[in-house]
Amino acid sequence: MFGACTLVFVRSRQQIEAEIRQRFGLVARAPQLELVERTLGGKSSLGIMPTGGGKSLTFQASALLLPGTVVVVSPLISLMRDQAGRLGRVLRVARLDSTLDRDEARDTLRALAVGELDLLYVAPERLANERFRAALGRTSVAALAVDEAHCISAWGHDFRPDYLRLPLLLADLGHPPFWP
């Protein structure tokens, strides 16, 4: 179900650039490289870029370069589907959202729990799911990202209240690098 991925140990900006170019076919810009470097160094970051500015590449490249799973919380199922579909040749990637049937969700949770995923997209409501949290507890979470974070402030305090679970999740995971 999930393709193979080779872990690459990167030490320099030039190596990061080369891996992004080779694996994703893209030329990374300085702000993207800085965010990836910070994550590889175990630091949290706030990446503010315009739409189409390449924010997603920062956590996708980190998922390629870090041991463990990068978890991305996104409010947009269509975006999760699109990104997971495009990345299947580069990363072991999956998504957990309400459109999956029971078997697909079970298979994804199993793959997460045994460390078979590099990148996992989840809807914010998944943060309240005990089976999901238990699977997270059995794997190594390399980083946690919030994609489309502007939706939270743009749509008000009662938009997707499960986002309020993020601080608890970060604490449960031992405070991995975080992109809000």
Image: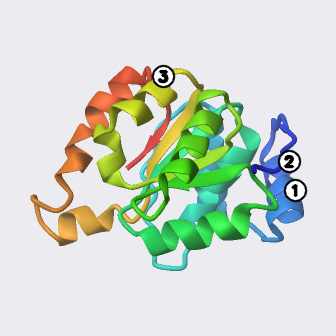
Q: Which mark is residue 91?
A: none
**Quadrant of the rendered image containing residue 42:** top right
Residue 115 lies left or right of residue 11; in this view the side is left
Total label count? Answer: 3
Q: Secondary structure at mark 1?
A: helix
User: Residue 173, how many percent across, how many down?
Assistant: 43, 24
User: Residue 92, how many percent across, how many down?
Assistant: 73, 49
Q: Amino acid at mark 2?
A: Gln
Task: State which tag comes first along the sequence, 3 or 2.
Answer: 2
Whether label 2 touches label 1, CB < 8 Å: yes
Q: CA distance from mark 2 to mark 1?
A: 5 Å
Within 10 Å of disc 1 (Cα), the crowding (few <14, some 14-19, many 20+) is some
Q: Amino acid at mark 3?
A: Gly
Q: Is residue 75 visible?
A: yes
Residue corresponding to mark 2: 15
Q: CA distance from mark 3 to mark 2?
A: 31 Å
Front position among marks 3 and 2: 3
Task: State which tag comes first along the sequence, 3 or 1.
Answer: 1
Q: Nearer the viewer, residue 95 or 55?
A: 95
